Amino acid sequence: MINTYNRSSISLDGSWNYIVDPYENGYFNYRYQPFDQMEDSGKNAYFSNAKQDDKSELVEYDFDKSDTLIVPGDWNSQKEKLFYYEGTVWYKKSFDFKKTLSSNRVFVYFGAVNYQSDVYLNGEKLGTHIGGFTPFNYEVTGLLKEKDNFLVLKVDNTRKKDAVPTLNTDWWNYGGITRSVKLVEVANSFIQDYMVQLAPTDKSRLKGFVRLNGKNIKNRAVTLSIPEIDFKSNLRTDANGYVELDTKIESITYWSPENPKLYRVVLETRQDKVVDDIGFRTLRTDGPNILVNDEPVFLKGISIHEENPLRGGRAHSLADAEQLLNWAKELGCNFVRLAHYPHNEHMLRLADKMGILVWEENPVYWTISWNNAETYKNAESQLSNVIARDKNRASVIIWSMANETPNSEARLKFLTSLAATARRLDPTRLISAALEQRDYQDNPLVQTIDDPFAEIVDVLAFNEYIGWYNGLPEKLGRVDWHITQNKPVVISEFGAGAKKGYHGDKLTRWSEEYQEDLYQESLKMLEEIDQLRGMSPWILVDFRSPRRPHPVIQEGWNRKGLLSDKGEKKKAYYVLQKYYKNKSVK
């Protein structure tokens, strides 16, 4: 179900009881057999939320007497004893609920849970979800009671070799129910999914689809209207409750970063009504140019992790999104790269309103199990879910397949298949990936992109760290580029670490002066790339990473931010801000 954002719902956010369970004692018996696969698991299974029936009965847990965590939120930043914890934590929420209409259906919706969740309502298993950054829901119509419901989740953030992302990442593995939980009540037959966008190469046509869910959805009338421009299209579903949209539209104001116009779009059937705020724009490439509404743009960007450094922990609220995107706007950005996984829906809807173009990324990061069919299925599922959620957001212009993945035949097949899936699900947006550069003909002063996946993408993006991981900043002035692909080039990452307030000369690692000099020299070098059409330097704000242990400089933080973990501007911030101020967007 998409657009729960604009549907009436009952929030289950707030205080949840929790039990830390590193041995998964609440899921397996002492023979390591899962309780939820037994005919009678008894009271030992935590999802039964059991209580003593008499004083002599042995029950070794009690949710209602256990400590609490706030949802949405991660356990690492809420409880000091769980700061480094990776494993299983059980959550329990009790609630009452009464439907507004007896024939209605009810779904429980999760914005995200990191990483694997087993979900139970009133002792019955609803399902298992894998993936820490995408939404999911279960129908609970037949299980709800008016009083004393209990929702239990087994949440496990253990890193696994065959998972997506895999064992090794350069960000914090925040565990928990990290985004909102709500009960969504809908009609017996409801609008489950829709896409309403301009045709990629024809601004005069509106294309897309509507899909209904429920009984008696064959040959149903569906009305799509945009009241502000007196637009209405009458549709009728097929036998499966599906109908395609392809109609002429006139007299609209096109969405752009300079004028982020949104229209109230209304989808309606006899039983259901959904409202969404949608911007309309076209998007394509032409040789080295990225064209929005047939006008070339330069992507003045920055990379962002989904983290609130001031509060600590995973960012999850609208206020968090406003803070991050306002910082990007102040820097002079018209573009953000949301790394390295799908971010909260707040970010995309706010970007629509603010006129910020967005790169969204699938968490295929570094070294994935390329030959594992289940790993691919996992990656494709996460990609499909974020496309389903955000395909109506005008701000989203790029679906990224991966970040810094090593070249191999298996990897090329894996990513090529992902790209084909993205194009099938959404033909209106561009495909990219953050690739890596190589020495050209063994010359370290000439860089090239010889990755075969460069032939698949629409936008040629790559990360480069000359001056930080590759020599010193002075090398930047001696490097040339040999890029043969006639495609737009976006520098998806460059940067250097610096601790706010630490000063030295421009050769002193970790000093603000070193980072400042690297930015100055990097921008000069990158301007020499003829196809350069944008960049998203690494990164807006310092963020937590267990890979960064230096006790004085890093202290568990990746220090490549232009802002410190307290939101303070470093010297390099002003270098990029000045560059963007003087850089034409066309």
Image (spheres, rainbow, N blue to C red):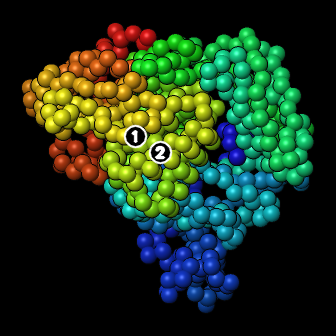
Query: Which of the two residues, 527 or 313, is positioned nearer the viewer here?
Result: 527
Depicted 586 relative to depicted 233: above or below: above
Q: Tell me residue 450's x, y (percent).
A: 30, 37
Question: Quadrant of the rendered structure where residue 441 is?
Answer: top left
As drawn, is 221 to the left or to the right of 353? right
Q: Could you say where residue 105 lies in the image, as x and y percent from the top left?
A: 81, 53
Task: Bin the neighbour count of mark 2 within 10 Å (Cα to Cα): few under 14, some 14-19, many 20 and up.
Answer: some
Q: Are marks 2 and 1 in contact (CB under 8 Å)?
A: yes
In terms of sequence position, does the residue under pointer 2 or pointer 1 come before the other?
2
Q: Tell me if residue 141 comes above or below residue 534 in the rendering.
A: below
Q: Can the viewer see residue 512?
A: no
- Which residue is found at the position 67% from the left and 64% from the top? 126
Secondary structure under the numbered disc 1 in the rendered image: helix
Residue drawn at (66%, 12%), measured in percent from left and top? 253
Q: How many marks?
A: 2
Q: Which amino acid does label 2 sit on?
A: Thr
Q: Residue furthest bottom?
A: 56
Q: Residue 501 carries which label?
A: none
Residue picked out by circle 1: 453
At which x and y percent is residue 552? 16, 44
Q: Distance between the residues labelled 2 and 1?
A: 7 Å
For this rendering, which residue is in front, 167 or 210? 210
Horizontal placement of 72 versus 404: left or right?
A: right
Crowdedness near tag 1: few (<14), some (14–19) or many (≥20) residues, C-alpha within 10 Å: some
Q: Residue at x 59, y 26 (%)?
A: 394
- For the point 74% across and 57% down, the residue is 139
Marking on residue 416: 2
> In this rendering, does residue 419 appear at all?
yes
- Disc 2 on helix, strand or loop? helix
Residue 528 lies left or right of residue 151; in this view the side is left
Left or right: 306, with 377 as reference point: left
Q: Which amino acid does label 1 sit on?
A: Phe
